[in-house]
Image (cartoon, coloured by chain):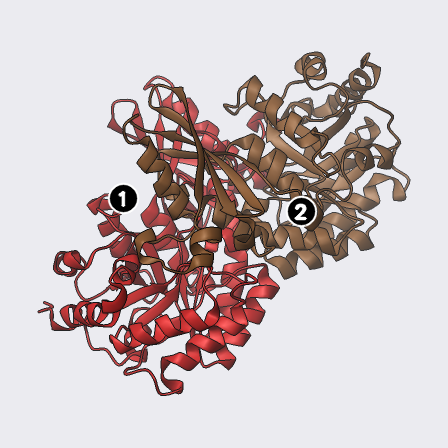
Chain colours: A red, B brown
Amino acid sequence: MQPALEAIYHVRSDARAIEERAHAIAVEQSVEMPITAIDDDFVLGEIVGRVLGIEEMDQNQFEVRIALAAETVGQDPGQLINMLFGNTSIHDDVVLHDVELPSEFSALFGGPRNGLQAWRDRVGAGRRALTCTALKPQGLPPRTLAELAGRFAQGGIDYIKDDHGLADQAYSPFAARVHAVAAALGRSGSGQGPTRYVPSLSGDLDAMRAQIAVAAEAGVDAVMIAPMIAGLSNFHTLVKEHPGIAFMAHTSFAGSARVAPALLFGKLFRLLGADAVVFPNYGGRFGYSRETCAQIARTALAEGVGLPPTMPVPAGGMMRERVPELLAFYGADAMLLIGGALLSAREALVETTAAFVAEVLGYPYE
Amino acid sequence: MQPALEAIYHVRSDARAIEERAHAIAVEQSVEMPITAIDDDFVLGEIVGRVLGIEEMDQNQFEVRIALAAETVGQDPGQLINMLFGNTSIHDDVVLHDVELPSEFSALFGGPRNGLQAWRDRVGAGRRALTCTALKPQGLPPRTLAELAGRFAQGGIDYIKDDHGLADQAYSPFAARVHAVAAALGRSGSGQGPTRYVPSLSGDLDAMRAQIAVAAEAGVDAVMIAPMIAGLSNFHTLVKEHPGIAFMAHTSFAGSARVAPALLFGKLFRLLGADAVVFPNYGGRFGYSRETCAQIARTALAEGVGLPPTMPVPAGGMMRERVPELLAFYGADAMLLIGGALLSAREALVETTAAFVAEVLGYPYE
């Protein structure tokens, strides 16, 4: 079998049953039928999944490494996740922990087109962490959201993304919102710096294409997308079709998929072209550990994989008081996203934003 | 707030903390920011999620009912799942158990265009269960798969679906496969009955559209799709664009999402237009209980929801020996899908298929 994907599963199993269980996963994720009923040599030699190794991690917990034929993917991102975790996702004793992809896949999918460095270049930042906030709550009309964006810009924030709840609703249609916010961010003169807007895409592939066109027309060159809702194939198609647009990937509906976060956000989203990945920071509203967050950032930035680095964007209930701690933890290669905590400052929103920005700019990066 | 979606979550929590936890979910799935920082009346009155009830199910296990504004969905299926379980999917103490949708949603999305009855009509079946099998293993060339399909047809099976691993790979391109299988199924004279083919879609929205066009050209009027890989919005767009095509929804990559199976497969897939839903049968290779399977079938068939019924398709490691038991369990309103167990018959594939078919046709349905 050559070349192969090496999928790594963490499996909960009795020690006596693990070998059989590992083989069952290899079959489920490849031919999905009894091997004894197959007599085609190509299928037996190239397509049937192969158990490469089983390692005990803990009592009743094993790491299983399985080779799956790269040919089964047929160059399609949706089919990639189908082969890695299609039916096996239904078994609750298995987590898809990691995958080692043949180097051909880096060239095939290409990764970020406007990754780590582009986010800095676009706002004229040197080697420092970037700042980001979110427009919300949903329900506000474009005018009010644009006004809010103008105030964040006065505070000097680098990027303003839509809350992922903002879609194309009657009370705030995408096109009206994008034009209003873009106008508020300096082209109309109200902005103080190079603050950039990252509107959120929704709908089917065609709707997302139309939204990108609207954004581009308004001078916006970055968008947010939830790949697990859009579908991985559609996400990647948008990336390929819009090389000048930076894509920020959002975790929505991705958290529960029993796929290791570092694999999904850091490796797969990056492979398919995410220029930045938003993920729930440790110690916020979500249950990710420090180690999980460090792994996501490490995977998004890892060198030697034939792909440009993706910008890590820790988020989710972050407080301004934690900025020094987060900068010490993530360093310069991150975009810190603080939403609700800035909005809570209300009248003092501009000053609070400016203080957040000053802290990030003034930090002594190594 | 009017009209509203009523989302029902099952939450693991300490009894003293459940009220706060329920409110946190209502905020997370609506405005995602501190309520105290909101002063817009429309947002406070209409958009902020509202806890309608909390009921103790078991120790440290609660059912929480939350109203979410229908306006936030903006008529988009992807945004529907984003509102129901976007960020909350990341919290591992919550399962999305069910949702009660405003009746407007049935009219908006429309459900199956070719549901329960169409599957029967197309193969000339009366009120009985239908039979189905799967083409596999992947890796075989179109010619061999077509030959296999011809033998299943000789056994008199109603439907032959692609294994969900069959995509658009070099060794079996979609178009070549569909034409070969369609030709083998009787238009060329080799089939004995009205056996129909259900090829599997893959790729992005455009690729799926092109595949449906190829299928239609070959006289095929049903396709399989994995909505969680395609993206719910893209799935629904295909349904709307192709009213003459029957859509069979596959569970791939859906099993792990911590959304109750009956909700996802029976209710949401149906709402968006799944004409049939494949799901893992109890006692097969997957861990679903009898009760879960009964719920999926019940939800897919439920009357009074303003939608035509969807065909339940239990599958996954089913044995021919279990057919009487499954017919007693599911009754006439089901399509029984047996794949590997028929393929294992090898030389006796036609006879084994015929015996399966005879059993389903001869069963004394109530």
| Depth check, front residue: A286 or A248 | A286
The kind of residue on which mark 1 rests is: Tyr
**Chain designation of label 1:** A
Mark 1 = which residue? Answer: A288
Q: Position of residue B249 (x, y in %)?
A: 64, 40
Examine the rendered structure and indicate whether residue B176 appears above or below residue A213.
Answer: above
- Name the residue: 50% across, 61% down: A236
Q: Label 1: how many residues lie within 10 Å, few (<14), some (14-19) or many (20+)?
A: some
The local secondary structure at tag 2 comes to helix
Can marks 1 and 2 be said to lie on one chain? no
Please tell me which residue lies in front, A233 or B50.
B50
| Figure quadrant of residue A140 | bottom left
Q: What residue is rendered at 81% in x and 49% in y?
A: B244
Callout 2: few (<14), some (14-19), or many (20+) C-alpha neighbours within 10 Å? few
Q: Name the residue under label 2.
A: B104
Percent from the top left, x then y, of residue A281? 26, 51
Q: In which quarter of the image is the C terminus of chain A?
A: bottom left
Secondary structure category for the residue under label 1 = loop
Q: Tag 2: residue type?
A: Glu
Residue A205 lies left or right of residue A239; in this view the side is right
Answer with left or right where residue B155 lies relative to residue B306. Answer: right
Q: In this view, does B196 lie above or below A146?
A: above
Most foreground residue, A364 or A19: A364
The answer, for residue A71, to whether it is visible in the render is no
Q: Residue at x 46, y 52 (%)?
A: B45
- Residue B208: image x %, image y %? 66, 55
Name the chain under label 2: B
Which one is in front in this view, the residue at disc 1 or the one at disc 2? 2
- Rendered residue at 51%/65% (across/down): A172
Quadrant in which residue A312 is drawn: bottom left
Are the residues at dot 1 and dot 2 in contact (C-beta closer than 8 Å)?
no
x and y, in percent, of residue A183 in the image: 43, 81
